[in-house]
Image (spheres, coloured by chain):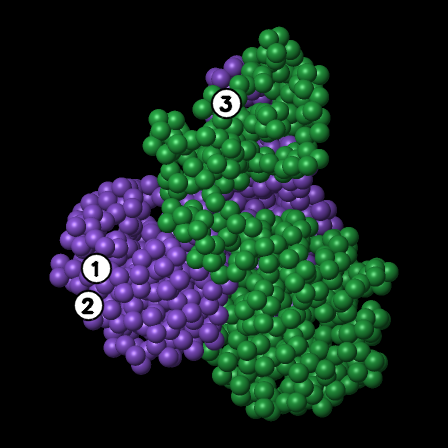
Chain colours: A purple, B green
Amino acid sequence: MEVKLFDTTLRDGAQTEGISFSLEDKLKIAKLLDELGMHYIEGGWPGSNPKDIEFFKAIKKVPLKNAKIVAFSSTRRPNVAVEDDKNIATLLAAETPAVAIFGKCWDFHVTHALRTTLPENLAMIKDTVAYAKGAGKVVIFDAEHFFDGYKNNPQYALKCLQAAEEAGADVLCLCDTNGTMLAYQAQKIINEVKPKVKTALGIHEHNDSACAVSVTGMAVHCGVTHVQGTINGYGERCGNADFCAIIPILKLKAGIDCVSDKQLQKLTEISRHIAEIANLPQSAHQPFVGRSAFSHKGGIHVSAVSKHPGTYEHIKPESVGNERRVTVSELSGISNLLVKAKEYKVDLKKGSEEAKELIKILKNMEHQGYSFEEGEASFELLLKRTLGLIKPFFTLDDFIIETHKEGDQPPVVTAHVKLKVAGKLKEATGTGDGPINAIDNALRKVLEDIYPQIKSVKLTDYKVRVLDSTAGTAAKVRVIISSADETRSWGTVGVSTNVIEASWLALVDSLEYKLIG
Amino acid sequence: MEVKLFDTTLRDGAQTEGISFSLEDKLKIAKLLDELGMHYIEGGWPGSNPKDIEFFKAIKKVPLKNAKIVAFSSTRRPNVAVEDDKNIATLLAAETPAVAIFGKCWDFHVTHALRTTLPENLAMIKDTVAYAKGAGKVVIFDAEHFFDGYKNNPQYALKCLQAAEEAGADVLCLCDTNGTMLAYQAQKIINEVKPKVKTALGIHEHNDSACAVSVTGMAVHCGVTHVQGTINGYGERCGNADFCAIIPILKLKAGIDCVSDKQLQKLTEISRHIAEIANLPQSAHQPFVGRSAFSHKGGIHVSAVSKHPGTYEHIKPESVGNERRVTVSELSGISNLLVKAKEYKVDLKKGSEEAKELIKILKNMEHQGYSFEEGEASFELLLKRTLGLIKPFFTLDDFIIETHKEGDQPPVVTAHVKLKVAGKLKEATGTGDGPINAIDNALRKVLEDIYPQIKSVKLTDYKVRVLDSTAGTAAKVRVIISSADETRSWGTVGVSTNVIEASWLALVDSLEYKLIG
């Protein structure tokens, strides 16, 4: 069985609260989607958004390996000839090989939102699909509100599909626009609809009932061969069906070759890259691609997984480009700590005084708000410092940071830092965009003379998490800094009620980790 | 049909990466779960975690309206008499009315993780269930890895269920421990298993395939009457089945009276309260209870929803205690802006110069990284300032913040602020836990004399979001401050590459919003 993947990250996904893609963002994402093996990439609604017109112009110059670009539009307006409808003219002007045309299939919507008659709506569907087919397009008919419409008036919902079919649509995509469907409800309706049309069926799910991925899987099980979704499940309200789950489900669980093994192995990387472009943190718990999707914390699981990964993993993490993680935390007990020590090539014996001491220190730090899951380099430093395996490369004498703001002017920040390095007192002054950037600059000025290798350390990510946010501006914060040099990347963490102190602790760890490496 | 809700937020949910509940937290959560109408609350595994023993002691003194407390344990160990097993003794010592006993149902797990024989595992199940029944407990048998086991060796998986049934178990709960199941697969297996046992069946789902809620709904559709899950879908890896979706699905879509209408209306509040206790931000996109679950951004949706909410909402937001939101953003266009203006009782005409000017300013601010979705008070101030409806209550002359750290000592922070208020220059010095707390204190010192009403303003939340985190410590940040007085709460926002500047902007808006109110 062949299933076509139709991505709408750039159109429906762009409706997510918090997302605002630039033209450059959209082009980058389109390339990633093509790399992943999407068959269709819906780029936007040219009739509704001028930025989308720019995208369709620009994407023509981008060579794509797999995907057809799709432009989206409603049917013609009521009581207007299709050739006189500006929206439809703009749609065709996008010059894409395929178009998605949405038409309403819920009688209530036709009369109460569109405010037209039921027969006129059928004519709108028919005219628009036929006109686009006449212009040589692949036409996907998005049957908007199909399921709600079918529940309310099955005859009319079917007539809408049949109108599109008679006009030559290539796909009839059943849309659950409000995200209302459960798997067994969709199963019943699709099994009723399928014998009544000859055209390929599609599915377009929203996640308002937390069932979008599952209903999509059920639809394919019932013979649907065209699947719409978005990367990371972006989309308005609760999002669309998440391709990061749908693709591995189709490929690994339903045995459908919708992408190649190699493309599937890029899934995690592409999910994270697009999350970065969207500037929304990827949920650690996101199925298949999240950082915690294959992480093991409880003692029993860790011990079983180390014997046989299949015992607690439903698929091989490598197959989707993800990895197994054993996390260090309060619940983990001694066995996880020993696993980590072994990984760092540190000799730590079960039941030893050192191990007990470390557990005590760890519990205390976790109580303060430390979490090493994203700051593992700080954990390794803590372990090695506690066991006396490393000595500090520098110690702070003092620093002063001054932030001065006059009227509406941006603040001016100066940081002065004094360190003991290699037995000598050294100092420097730095400026910067904010207090943390200024102290970072000052610290590097002092250290680079003596430790030139830190010049290659780049801070690649800086995150602030307010821990007890109900304390207002006196809240405790956890700062996580990600760093990289030419060959490695690492994360460090600092916690304090003072964001500058927390950042300082994570900064110092970042540089010390480089120096021990 | 009657369905019993079995909550495991305190046991399986506590395995979530990033969660660490204190005893106090667990007691608070248990009370909230009871209020929501849970029939069973699993409190922990006394044999594995000493903190859980404390919980079972303490919860006895808490009067509960609905829920039975449950203690969790594995079956007895291989080749040990059940009355000699310390784990089982500890389980009964918890003195709960009900116990959940998990036993392995996957032959591969029995031989490769437990490392015992298949008949011995059956004896372990039978002995342990019978012993707990003999002690007068309600016994839920958690058939661990039931679905994986059934796929591999259906006869043996069924034998495990039958062993528990013969020993008197009250519920046979089918566990999808690795989160592997799709809805149609679960349907097939449950339909095969159901006729072969007489005891009530339960379902325990994990979300590794993004199908946990849907499979749970399917299981109930197939006749399962006991449902396990967690609030907000907490749980290790990708989490457990989310009760915040399951409860409204059962109640509103499957017509099963598992909680009362009033209890259902508490769902959003309880979800957010438990998220606060867990100190994990609730996802805005969480189905049913998220802030964005009923938010409308796109122009077409907003115009339809304002006519008939049913057009784009699958359930009434009030039924789960949530609310409809119209959000302001770049994609919204003029119609959303007009809706907001009307809400603020501001006269703004479509097509007017003021409206065009506002759209221009808004687009520019969004480009800088502003987002008013959580900082709506700043949006209202912007609108009213731009239209000349309010004048500033004070202006900044200048401020200086100094942060001084010596050696290992915590930094000392001083802020000095000079303002023009009511035509006069006023100044004050404040100290604090960090630079933002210090400037907040100094600012209030100056203002409280002249505007005593700001004494009632409490900052209830403070969030920092790094926008372009790849710029490291020079990254742009968005600060969101939530404030409240005796009767209202509001959110304000500031954006800058300097966290102090961004906080200052949000702080000023917070106080100005109070002053215009």
Q: Residues within 10 Å of mark 2 (few under 14, many from 20)?
A: some
In the rendered image, residue B493, in percent from the top left (x then y), is placed at 53, 33
Residue B473 visible in the snapshot: no
Q: Are marks 2 and 1 in contact (CB under 8 Å)?
A: yes
Pointer 1 chain? A
In the rendered image, residue A15, in percent from the top left (x then y), is placed at 40, 49
In which quadrant of the rendered image does the N terminus of chain A lie? bottom left
In the rendered image, residue A106, in percent from the top left (x then y), is placed at 37, 64
Name the residue tied to disc 3: B389
**In the image, farthest residue toward the right:** B61
Left or right: B421 in relation to B61: left
Name the residue tied to disc 2: A167
Residue B201 visible in the snapshot: yes
Identify the residue shown where x is 72% and y is 83%. Answer: B169
Instruction: Report the amino acid beneath label 1.
Output: Thr
Judge by depth and name the residue closer to the eye, B498 or B251: B251
Q: Is residue B105 above or below residue B227?
A: below
Name the residue tied to disc 1: A128
Q: Earlier in the sequence, mark 2 or mark 1?
A: 1
Left or right: B177 in relation to A153: right
Q: Quadrant of residue A23?
A: top left
Q: Secondary structure at mark 2?
A: loop
In the rendered image, residue B115, in percent from the top left (x then y), is placed at 63, 80
